[in-house]
Image (cartoon, grey):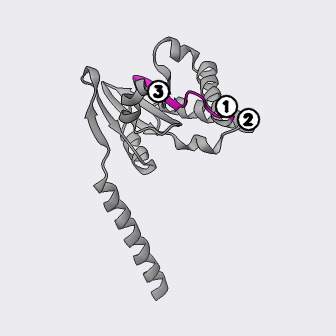
Amino acid sequence: MKSVNCAGLIIFGVMAILIMAACDNPPQTQTGPNNNSYIIVENATSVTLAVSEISSKPDKVELIYFHTKNPCHCMAVVQDNIQYAVDTYFKNEVANGRVKLTMVVSDDPANAALVQKYNAMLFTLFIKETRDNTERIYPVSDIWNMTGDDNRDKLVNFIKLKVNSILEGKSS
């Protein structure tokens, strides 16, 4: 009986520490061009909480993929698969402006401000949801388990499901 109580106290303590740590790192809210506010959410726990608080469908969804000017084959495949997913499954949404794909060359000095805004690495995918002039921006790190030629269908399907979920106003 004492071991059950001890285990319960340990679990409670760990959960309390995680909650306090999350409170110390709230999402950053900043004002960008055109007086739009945007929130950068940096960790998966915050992404789940931040997006689940929103019940309405976004006005726009933008995928921003940072890549280098001369990517290796593996990274070029990731870029091609993201492009393919958007071109194939979101033609209508792209045409009406509801979905947008932006490719940013991360090692081009002309893009330094964007790299800094997103705190992007050389290769990073972000999703930006816009609702009533408020942007929520978060990294999508799940794609790195789906690199290479053999994972094309897996990555394309992941992008399709992720964007559809967001467009439907569901938690991402």
Q: CA distance from mark 2 to mark 1?
A: 7 Å
The image quadrant that residue 56 belongs to is top left
Bin the neighbour count of mark 3 within 10 Å (Cα to Cα): few under 14, some 14-19, many 20 and up: few
Residue 86: in sight, yes or no?
A: yes
CA gap between label 3 and label 1 equals: 20 Å
Assign a secondary structure to mark 2: helix
Residue 151 is situated, as x and y percent measured from the top left of the image, at 71, 38
Residue 152 in the image: state x and y as whole percent: 70, 33
In front of the other: 6 or 73: 73
For the residues labelled 3 and 2, the Cα–Cα distance comes to 26 Å
Can you see residue 1? no
Is disc 1 surrounded by few (<14), some (14 to 19) or many (20+) residues within 10 Å? some
**Mark sitting on residue 149:** 2
Where is 35 relative to 143, above or below? above
Helix, strand or loop status at disc 3: loop
Span of residues in magenta = 57-73
Q: Are marks 2 and 1 in contact (CB under 8 Å)?
A: yes
The residue type indicated by label 2 comes to Asp
Q: Is residue 33 magenta?
A: no
Q: Earlier in the sequence, mark 3 or mark 2?
A: 3
Element marked by disc 1: helix
Q: Label 3, on which residue?
A: 108
**Counting residues from the N terminus, which is met first, the one under dot 3 or under dot 1?**
1
Image depth: mark 3 or mark 1 in front:
3
Question: Above or below — where is 95 with respect to 143?
Answer: above
What amino acid type should be assigned to the residue bearing mark 3? Answer: Asp
